[in-house]
Image (spheres, coloured by chain):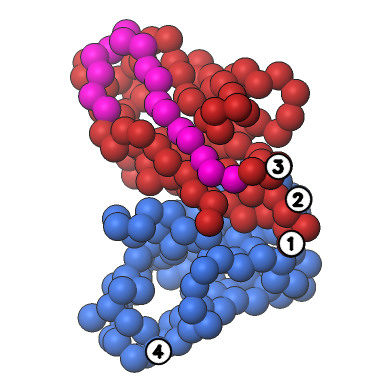
Amino acid sequence: AQSVSQHNHHVILSEAASLELGCNYSYGGTVNLFWYVQYPGQHLQLLLKYFSGDPLVKGIKGFEAEFIKSKFSFNLRKPSVQWSDTAEYFCAVNALSNQGGKLIFGQGTELSVKP
Amino acid sequence: KAGVTQTPRYLIKTRGQQVTLSCSPISGHRSVSWYQQTPGQGLQFLFEYFSETQRNKGNFPGRFSGRQFSNSRSEMNVSTLELGDSALYLCASSLLPGLADEQYFGPGTRLTVT
C-alpha cells in the first residue's frame, strides 16, 4: 500500500536556524508531491508542490523542497526559520493511476521555533 | 473570493446515530475531496467528487458515503456512528479533478461521538 513517512514528529529550533524536514513515500508510479502547512488556529494551506521538471521547487515564505526520485524523497528546507514558522507541516503525495488520484498524507511534523 | 466553508463546525452525536456534513467549495471549483483527521491516524483521504461523480475512494467502510450536487456543493454522511469516528473532517476543493492540483482546505467539522 502507498504510504508517506515523515521522519520527525516534533522539531524544536531557535530563530535563524536552518530547517530540513524529511519526507519519504512508497509508490513506484507517477506522483505529484506537496507540502502543506497548518499554522495555529488556521486552515491547511499549500507551501509548495512538485509535478514535473526542476526537482528543486520553491514555495512561499522562503521554503523549498527537493524531489529525489531515486530515494523516493521530498524533503522540505528553509535556510533560516522565524518564530512565525511555528506550525505543523504535512507532506502529501498524490499517487496517480488510471483510477484517478489519491492524496496520501504523512503524519505531520510539528515545528516549534523559539524566539 | 470566499474560501471553502463547512457546516456545522462542531457536532456531538451518539453512537449508532447518523450524521451529514456539508461543504461549499470555492466558487468555480468543481472538485471536492474529503479527509478524516485524527491524532492516531493523521489525515486520511475519504473520497473525491468531480462533476457530481465520485472519482476515487479511500479505505473506509461503506458507512461513509458522500455526494455532490450540480452547484458543486458536497455532503458526506456517516451512518451507524462508532466512537472511533470522532475526528476532524476536512473538505477541500480544487479546480482540476484527480487531486492533481492545489487543494484549498476548509476549517473542518469537529465530530464527537459519545
**Tint of chain B:** blue
Q: Chain of mark 1?
A: A
Residue A95 colored in magenta in the image: no
- Give the residues in magenta: A11-27
Q: Which disc, if any, is residue A30?
A: 3
Q: Which residue corresponds to the image point at 62% horizontal and 28% vertical from the top-left?
A: A69
Q: Secondary structure at mark 4?
A: loop
Mark 3–mark 4 CB contact (< 8 Å): no
Is B101 or B20 nearer to us in this picture?
B101
Mark 2–mark 4 CB contact (< 8 Å): no
Q: Which residue corresponds to the image point at 32% horizontal and 8% vertical from the top-left?
A: A16
Q: Which residue corresponds to the image point at 56% horizontal and 33% vertical from the top-left?
A: A72
The residue identified by callout 4 is B80
The residue identified by callout 2 is B96
Q: Amino acid at mark 3?
A: Thr
**Tint of chain A:** red
